[in-house]
Amino acid sequence: MSSTIDLKHINAWIFDLDNTLYPYENSLFPQIEKRIRNFVSKTLNVDKDEAHRIQKKYFHAYGTTMLGLMNDHGVDPYAFLEYVHDINITKIQPDKNLSVAIERLPGQKFVFTNADYTYANRVLNRIGFSNNAFDGIFDIESAGWVPKPNPLTYQRMVGQTGINPSKSVFFEDLARNLVPASEMGMTTVWLKNDAEWTDLAAESFSADYVITSLSSWLNDIVEGL
């Protein structure tokens, strides 16, 4: 991890969505996790405990529960995403400081998420981003349903956005999702939180920067860029 911040070479800023562009403490993910568990229970006709076990098994094995369900049970990804993202997002507090800081960053800005485009837009609007704040959203459908941290998805994202990895920085709350980005030459920023899954791979991987507040960190550095 670097002790000094050097991002003057960066011309592409890439952000994960959930628990990154809004704080983990906003507690959207417990709602999503519950709906995933309910979906698994109903679809596979298992009780909630078994659904939870399957949910976690697929998350660790495939990167998302959805991909496991698609591969092993032929689940329709659109039906899955529509169900699990039917949540109340009013817990997200609009963050003017964050939206202004990101809009002031030099170069292109992208969202890179394992969620779908419709849900991502909902969340971004709730945070307070304008419609042209980002140059694009690379979502799970863009990735061919193959989620982070599969390296193929990062290659697809780079190909579709046209970014230069060596001049790009990637912000993520999941340490394991930073590993392929780092291997491609991206600068990595780990937004660490208290979630049980955030530090997967952290013992064997060192991000370039480790932060606890995206809004504060970006506002601190934007003046010097």
Image: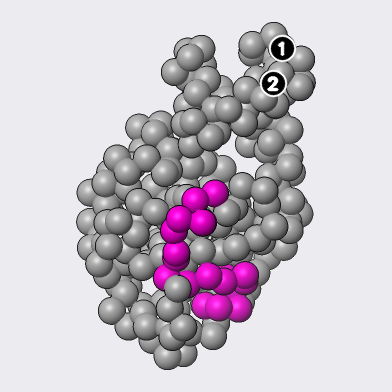
Mark 2 vs 1, N-terminal side: 1
Magenta span includes 201: yes
Name the one closer to the observer, 132 or 61: 61
The reply to whether residue 220 is visible in this rendering is yes
Q: Quadrant of residue 81?
A: top right
Q: Residue at 66% across / 29% down in the picture?
A: 36
Q: Quadrant of residue 47?
A: top right
The segment highlighted magenta reads: 200-218
Q: Residue furthest top?
A: 45
Q: Using the numbered discs, state the Cα–Cα distance from disc 2 to disc 1 in whole angstroms.
A: 6 Å
Q: Would you call the spot at circle 2 few (<14 residues within 10 Å), some (14-19), or many (20 or more)? A: many
Q: Quadrant of residue 56?
A: top right
Name the one closer to the observer, 218 or 89: 218
Q: Disc 2 residue type?
A: Ala
Q: Is residue 10 above or below residue 89?
A: below
Task: Answer whether labels 2 and 1 touch (C-beta < 8 Å).
Answer: yes
Q: Residue at 64% across / 13% down in the picture?
A: 43
Could you tell me which secondary element the residue under label 1 belongs to?
loop
Labelled disc at residue 51: 2
Q: Position of residue 7 (x, y in %)?
A: 36, 79
